[in-house]
Image: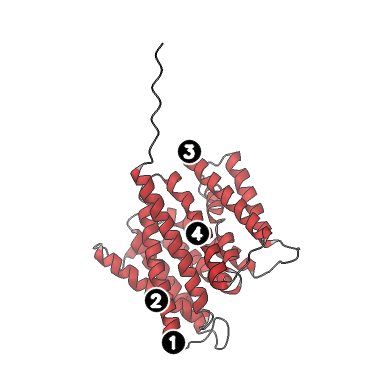
Amino acid sequence: MGLNPPTPARTPSPDNLRGSLFMVLSMAGFAVEDMLLKAAARSLPLGEVLFIFGLGGLAGFVILTLLRGERVLHPAYLSRAILVRSGFEVTGRLFYALAFVLIPLTTATAILQATPLVVVAGAALFLGERVGWRRWSAIAIGFGGVMLILRPGLAGYDALSLLAVAGMLGFAGRDLATRAAPPVLSHMQLGICGFAMLTLVGAGLALTGANTVWGGMHWPDARVAGLLAGATAFGVVGYYALTVAMRTGDVGVVTPFRYTRLVFALILGVLVFAERPDALTLIGSAVVVGSGVFTLLRGARK
């Protein structure tokens, strides 16, 4: 009696492997960007930090757009979807920046990981996408993880953590609005929109008043200028790598690697800022990440 030949092991798709590696690179870039901006904000008002960072990122994306032979100024920037997206971009950038400056980087990043859950819920509520009970359950569990991180009413509750929640909701709204953005705009042109709004927000904060955590302008010394230059470089690299990742391989395989950002933030928070996240923060982070990965994989499967 013959034996059936063994089933050959499935090898990972080269595109999936490449897309996943670019996603990890992107998340590492964003984590380092946050760390450098947090360090710079210890010496400069936050408004000035965001203004300089926004200008640097804007210049980077203008150069990338020109290299691709695309228009820097496009009439589609004034479309309703882009204006709505810009409003959410401002909300996300502003409140998340305030969060990672005023609370531990690990906590702010952990709350940010709930963004995909809010995007899925928003797509079901506002865009008519079908979401089954399994994904709704995962979304509810993920929000429970956020509550573990926030711990309202318990010892260790910090109201400033709500800044990270506001930033997360802003980014989720931006991602939802991006789905309705005119397809004639490339990712690079959308990057120009985002950093242009960030520059305006930074300038507005800087002009609100001197001698505050966000107002006023001071000439940065060489160390702080280096931090801002590094944040800009890592931010542009992170955004570009994210674009490559989302255009390479299967979305269901590549997208869950977004959660590596939390790992990088945890490492940087401990090594650079001597942060010591407690058990509830770590458990809540694991719940959010697990729920998000399940939701993304389930959505890709459907």
- Mark 4 or mark 3: whose residue is earlier in sequence: 4
Which callout, 2 or 4, points at the residue further toward the start of the chain? 2
On residue 221, the disc is 1
User: In front of the other: label 3 or label 1?
Assistant: 1
Task: Name above or below for residue 163 compared with residue 208.
Answer: above
Q: Secondary structure at mark 1?
A: loop
Q: Which residue is mark 4?
A: 261
Q: Residues within 10 Å of mark 2 (few under 14, many from 20)?
A: some
Colour scheme of the rendered structure: secondary structure
Residue 114: image location, x then y, percent: 57, 55
Whether residues under marks 3 and 1 lie with C-beta atoms below 8 angstroms apart, the answer is no
Residue 81 in view here = no
Kind of residue sitting beneath label 1? Asp
Q: Is residue 256 visible?
A: yes
Which residue position is annotated with label 3? 301
User: Tag 2, which secondary structure?
Assistant: helix
Q: Which mark is residue 279?
A: none
